[in-house]
Image: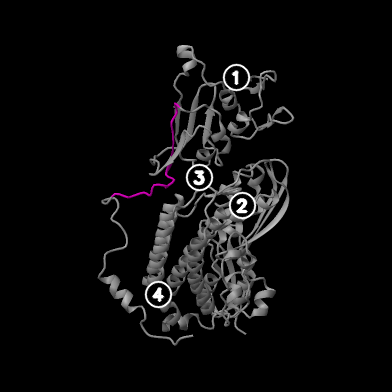
Amino acid sequence: MAERSVIPFGPQHPVLPEPVHLDLVCEDETVVEAVPSIGFVHRGLEKLVEQKDFKQYVYIAERVCGICSFGHGMGYCQAVEHVMNIEVPPRANYLRTIWMEMSRVHSHLLWLGLLADALGFESLFMQSWRLREKILDQFDEMTGGRVIFSVNCIGGVLKDLSDEQLKTLLKVIDEIEAELKPILRTFLQDYTVASRLRGLGVLSPDDAIAQGAVGPMLRASGVSYDARMTGYAAYGDLEMEPIISKDGDSYARCEVRLKELLQSFDLIRQAVAKIPAGPIAVPVKGNPNGEYFNRIEQPRGEAFYYVKGNGTKFLDRFRLRTPTTSNIPPMVSMLKGCQLADVPLLILTIDPCISCTER
Amino acid sequence: MSKSKLFPFMPTALKNLFSKPATTAYPFEPATYPERMRGHVEIEIEKCISCGLCARSCPPTALTVDRAAGTWTINRFDCVQCGSCVNVCPKKCLHIVPGYATPGPQKKSETFTRPTPPSKADGKVGLQTGGHPVNDHDKCVYCTLCARKCPQGAITVDRAAKTWTLDKEACVSCGLCASSCPKKCLTMKED
């Protein structure tokens, strides 16, 4: 048996956009065990709910993460709205859905860029991020922010979209879809990309369920589960089927995310076609009293939002379980037996968001 | 799944080689900001009534309102441009406008002082602020205007039962109720 050695990986590593540390126990070039440790960017945002009132906290909830910011704001608002029995106007629900899907597009394009970068495919990385800029510009036009939108509020949304803006959005979506085609073709058909991703980090459907994988990780293993199917916001009115792939390897995870981009374009088009006129928010009176568990499908997977109110303007507890938290155990099991050179790529395929995880 | 190919990215790579850069040559070309961009907060200090709602709602506590001195202070380095203050301002005197705040070597605050209220200058009755509203039930017609004007929803008026109740904890002493009362039956009084 070869001698075992422990290689520290992270928190500072060229492939990691955010800090996570892994102790990789290796036998020669093969990883036999990976021990993750987190806690490098903990900011105590959950505790802050005791000091900021429940309306102010919307702005803090969306600052949990720079990529899934809209989803965090929306998940928190929905949870508080359930506690307070507030019915959100239909137009606000549609606007939330449109922004949520746009967030998914920008998150997946960011991930594709990072993947291309990890593969050493610089120009593909640049192309993915160039497309992402178009979505960010649209966010800037619609909400006033590129990544932190501050448009959610308890009872609805703060900003409306004119017909003109919705038309521009559709035009931009068409442009992105047309420009995405060569990128999609490259990821799915390029010989080098395929040889780097195929058969790497295979996760069987049973393992994926047993180890708690969520989002594209779970769907890439062939499990048809998507929290959007529960029909929150306006998803109940829109037609969609979870995107799945059978292989469960890194290639399948890439494929699921690519196809989800196309699905998001479709959902945005459906939402724009069906969006009703009307108010965008309802006035909120009183304070939340009670508790609720809300779940939504973030770009990285299913996220949980728990709120507990005590009848005052300060909540007793806010708990957020992010998709990356659930995806770390399957990642650790995937790392066992892989080559040391594949570790960065495998970590990347779960689309880790450590800032979310540590809050 | 379709078969693997060699060089499927080649047409895109060649196109990019001969096309214009996707980036702009800032600072030689000026940056353009969209209309809704949340750049920095501005105040129309002459409209401000020092109610302090903005400071209470500010998540990073970047705002300070001194009612006695009539000042509104913003620490631009703490401000996160969330727009919370703009959303709660009852007088709509706060605006979030495009363009970033100026960078600087030191964290400084900017203070704006309200001009002297007209009540002192020419004897006219200005907006009464401070304390809490007290209702003269003999004069009150329970029209609910005060309750509708209250930015905090602190006043509840029941027209049928002829009751007027104030939630003192929620009241921010802005005086908007007193100024909107058609019967002049509300007066702002210190406890």
Foreground disc of the pair 1, 4: 1
Q: Nearer the viewer, residue A38 or A132?
A: A132
Disc 3, disc 4: CB below 8 Å? Answer: no
Tell which subunit mark 4 falls on.
A
Name the image quarter holding residue A185.
Answer: bottom left
Foreground disc of the pair 1, 2: 1
- Measured along the vertical axis of the image, is residue B62 above or below residue A136? above
Residue A25 coordinates in the image, percent (x, y): 60, 74
Q: Amino acid at mark 2?
A: Val
Quarter of the C terminus of chain A within the rendering: bottom right
Q: Residue at x 58, y 34 (%)?
A: B151
Residue labelled with disc 1: B184
Please check whether the numbered discs 1 and 3 fall on a single chain. yes
Residue labelled with disc 4: A181
Upstream in the sequence, badge 1 or badge 3? 3
Tell which subunit mark 3 falls on.
B
- Measured along the vertical axis of the image, is residue B83 above or below residue A43? above
Please check whether the numbered discs 2 and 4 fall on a single chain. yes
Please check whether the numbered discs 2 and 3 fall on a single chain. no
Residue labelled with disc 2: A88
Foreground disc of the pair 1, 3: 1
Residue labelled with disc 3: B82
Q: Amino acid at mark 3?
A: Cys
